Amino acid sequence: MTSDTPPPLTEALAAGTVVLDGGMSNQLESAGHDLSDELWSARLLAERPEAITEAHLAYFEAGANVAITSSYQATFEGFAKRGIGREEAARLLTLSVELAREAARQAHAEGVAGPLWVAASVGPYGAMLADGSEYRGRYGLSVAELERFHRPRLEVLAAAGPDVLALETVPDADEAAALLRAVRGLDTPAWLSYTVDGGRTRAGQPLEEAFAPAADADEVIAVGVNCCAPEDVEHAIETAVRVTGKPVVVYPNSGEAWDAGARAWNGRTSFTAEQVEAWRRAGARLIGGCCRVGPQAITSIAQAVGAA
């Protein structure tokens, strides 16, 4: 097995805690890239792919073991609004995985030790709308309609060969049901991660109800939460462990709040590395950060995990 072919992620989860990366958008913005666009970071797949590789590399250098690809807002429908056809859109989705792999190769060449994995980001339907709907859910679509939306993109991403599919920032248990149906038969493991508010999904369903379908989904190797307040994480971990018995994935935001109308973050940061040990004790096995959590915070998480 070469350094470019890491062992299955499930083996690492059985052995201990794995560190995820932080927010892609804030890392790109800190490097001077303008993301004020409906495609968000996905626009750079076409215009500045090397910038995405650099962002992944910064997180690997900071101590992350897993890079989450820049495909969160990359969809056939979203690209079509920009005049990008399906063939080119599929190429860009595939490229998102290849760029993360390239960053892992560069990290190993620079002396970063250990296996480095790639998680292909699959954002919710609301991300494509680019109006903050991923923080509300309840799109007015059926589970079958949502499955038809997600399946083509999932097929392309799975064919690109990621280590895991990150079904992330899911606001609604109905959309989770669609995603669980859509990943069947792809022969690629997945994690399912909700965005939550307190003990409920953004759409208002209790987490006990939201996590339950993942318990019997063989494709799902971890369940949890992301793009939420750090204060909501510990309850979610305890619920996920109790309901599913599976490893838990957590990567909250900095604690600031997103204003979709102003397209800006406000409030204070409440994410600290000291919270990591409590999350690990509660059952988290994949720990990182989402929006506004940068390489410095990931280094602190890696140090906390290493100390534990």
Image (tube, rainbow, N blue to C red):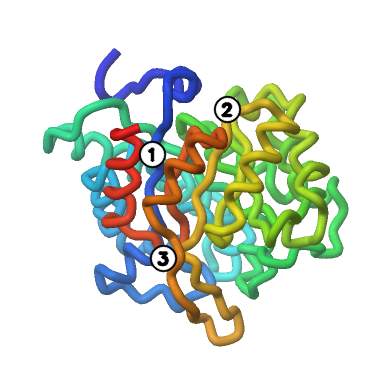
Query: How far is disc 3 from disc 2 in space, using C-alphas?
Result: 27 Å
Q: Is residue 148 visible?
A: no
Instruction: Please identify the quadrant where the C terminus is shown.
Output: top left
Residue 196: image x %, image y %? 67, 57
- Of callouts 2 and 1, which one flags the residue occurring earlier in the amino acid sequence? 1
> What residue is shown at x 54% (from left), y 74% (from top)?
257
Residue 306: image x %, image y %? 30, 33
Instruction: Name the kind of residue labelled 3 in the image.
Output: Arg
Q: Of the numbered discs in the image, which one, if any, rests on residue 200?
A: none
Residue 298: image x %, image y %? 33, 50
Q: Disc 1 on helix, strand or loop?
A: strand
Q: What residue is shown with label 1? A: 19
Q: Can you tell which quarter of the image residue 45 is in? A: bottom left
Q: Disc 3 on helix, strand or loop?
A: loop
Label 1 Cα neighbours within 10 Å, binned few <14 / some 14-19 / many ≥20: many
Q: How many marks?
A: 3
> What residue is shown at x 42% (from left), y 31% (from top)?
17
Instruction: Name the kind of residue labelled 1 in the image.
Output: Val
Q: Nearer the viewer, residue 89 or 22?
A: 22
Q: What residue is shown with label 2? A: 189
User: From what the image shows, is residue 146 above or below residue 203?
Assistant: above
Q: What residue is shown with label 3? A: 292
